[in-house]
Amino acid sequence: MDNIAKLIFKNKRAKTENLLKTGFQKRGQQFVRQQPLLNQAFTLTVTVTLPDTILTELIDNETKQPYTLHLNANNTGDFVAKVREAYTNVLKTIATESFETDIFQTTQAHLLIQTCRKNYGDELEFLWQKFPENAIWRRSDTKKWYALLMKISKRKLGLDSDDLVTIVDFRLTAKQHDQLIDNQTFFPGYHMNKQHWFTVILDGSIPDTDLLQFLQTSYELAH
């Protein structure tokens, strides 16, 4: 994926039904869309492999060769700028119409999102413009938070790694606090009151059944 596409499709996930509605054709495991660019001067082919792999090819219709000058920001000139603008606008339209925002891409994050939607009717709330990878759930009746999703470095949890991970913060009882916190799998609440919240990494290190029970307990504690 080129740098323009990487920026546009960051934290995006394709939806099959939307791809089909917006001109993509299913070819095996891929979805392909072709369209003219700049008054038929070019043909742009966009190939999507679910969930989030995007490949593009821009062909100069006169030479029948791939055109790539627009992908290098150091290449200037009116014509290259027009190609870059047209190319960018098409990709932005595809990202808006055929993809959905998917910041938290782990399987367990998706499980929590689906469970909160189904069981409580709650959607993630992104409250901080400066921190687009932080979001919360709150009860609709009490307006109290019961979980937070974030992407942080493992090092911020005291682990010896700079790997970026998706974490969730839950409320917990005093008894849970004494039993759970081990700073390996269960951590004191990150950015929250460490006596009343705890953190886990959504990497499968705890079973889904336990994760959903923690969610339910946290929801009840936010009464």
Image (cartoon, helix red, strand yellow):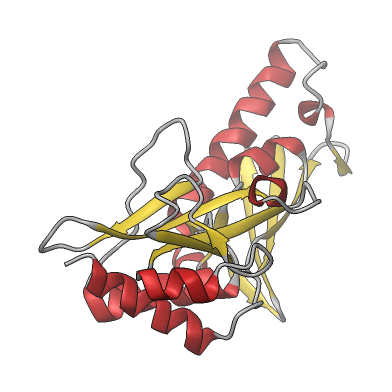
Instruction: Kindly tell me whether residue 20 is visible in this rendering.
Output: no
- Residue 94, position as x, y percentages in the image: 52, 50
Left or right of residue 173: residue 5: right
Residue depicted at x 63% and y 44%: 36
Identify whether 111 is placed above or below 45: below
Residue depicted at x 48% and y 71%: 178
Viewer-nearest residue: 213 or 117 = 213
- Residue 24, position as x, y percentages in the image: 57, 65
Viewer-nearest residue: 121 or 94 = 121
Instruction: Kindly tell me whether residue 103 is visible in this rendering.
Output: yes
Name the quadrant containing residue 206: bottom right
Q: Residue furthest left?
A: 141
Q: Which quarter of the image is occupied by the C terminus?
A: bottom left
- Residue 77, position as x, y percentages in the image: 75, 10
Residue depicted at x 37% and y 69%: 174
Left or right of residue 105: residue 126: left
Viewer-nearest residue: 163 or 84 = 163
- Residue 87, position as x, y percentages in the image: 64, 36
Viewer-nearest residue: 130 or 211 = 211
Q: Residue furthest top?
A: 77
Identify whether 137 is placed above or below 202: above
Left or right of residue 193: residue 86: right
Q: Residue furthest bottom?
A: 209
Residue depicted at x 86% and y 42%: 66
Name the quadrant containing residue 80: top right
**How many numbered marks are there?**
0
